[in-house]
């Protein structure tokens, strides 16, 4: 199964921020949307990712002044990304190896989706449950 299949049918409006926005503005967006990360766009291209971890590290380093800094100064860059044709297992392996929880999905360099490790794990759990149900049905009918 590919990332394209997971994001098919999703509302394609991706919550994001710009490098010029303040950490305060980006943190408010994270809190309002109850999400863990935002792709950071520069002229429509992914320049990096601003995550809860970036916020935490920024506050730990800069204290109260952190909220006035530009996202571009504290984001994780460059962003590690995948393509729609990437398999779910490849994406999970990449996330585990790189210790990240969010991946921009790029097609031709353009952001088409943003997936979290939760999206991918949910897919895997649903698949295992479906396979288990199919096996139970097979056993019942035998």
Image (tube, rainbow, N blue to C red):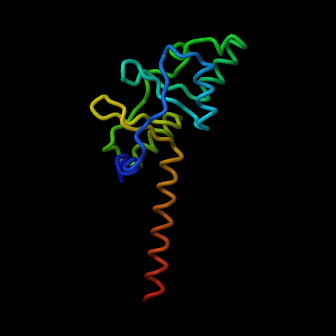
- Residue 13 in the image, given as x and y percentages of width and height: 43, 37
Vertical order, 68 against 12 (above or below): above
State the residue lying farthest toward the bottom.
142
- Residue 31 in the image, given as x and y percentages of width and height: 64, 32
- Residue 132 in the image, given as x and y percentages of width and height: 49, 71
User: Which image quadrant for residue 47?
Assistant: top left
Vertical order, 55 against 119 (above or below): above
Describe residue 102's horizontal placement relative to residue 108 as left or right.
right
Vertical order, 121 against 102 (above or below): below
User: Where the N terminus falls, by quadrant?
Assistant: bottom left
User: Which image quadrant for residue 62?
Assistant: top right
User: Where the C terminus falls, by quadrant?
Assistant: bottom left
Q: Nearer the viewer, residue 101 or 27?
A: 27
Q: Residue at x 36, y 18 (%)?
A: 43
Q: Nearer the viewer, residue 134 or 11?
A: 11
Q: Residue at x 30, y 35 (%)?
A: 107
Describe residue 97's horizontal placement relative to residue 63 as left or right.
left
Describe residue 133's horizontal placement relative to residue 85 as left or right.
right
State the residue lying farthest toward the right.
64
Q: Nearer the viewer, residue 25 or 117?
A: 25
Q: Nearer the viewer, residue 99 or 5?
A: 5
Q: How many marks?
A: 0
Q: Residue at x 60, y 18 (%)?
A: 23
Q: Residue at x 61, y 29 (%)?
A: 52
């Amino acid at each position: 199964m590919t990332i394209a299949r997971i994001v098919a049918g999703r509302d394609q409006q991706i919550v994001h921020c710009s490098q010029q926005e303040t950490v305060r503005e980006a943190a408010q967006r994270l809190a309002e949307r109850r999400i863990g990360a935002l792709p950071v766009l520069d002229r429509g291209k992914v320049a990096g990712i601003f995550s809860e971890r970036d916020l935490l590290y920024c506050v730990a380093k800069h204290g109260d002044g952190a909220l006035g800094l530009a996202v571009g100064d504290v984001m994780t860059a460059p962003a590690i990304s995948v393509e729609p044709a990437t398999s779910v297992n490849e994406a999970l392996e990449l996330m585990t190896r790189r210790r990240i929880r969010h991946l921009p999905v790029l097609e031709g360099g353009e952001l088409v989706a943003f997936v979290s490790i939760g999206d991918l794990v949910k897919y895997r759990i649903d698949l295992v449950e479906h396979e288990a149900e199919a096996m139970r049905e097979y056993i019942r009918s035998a």
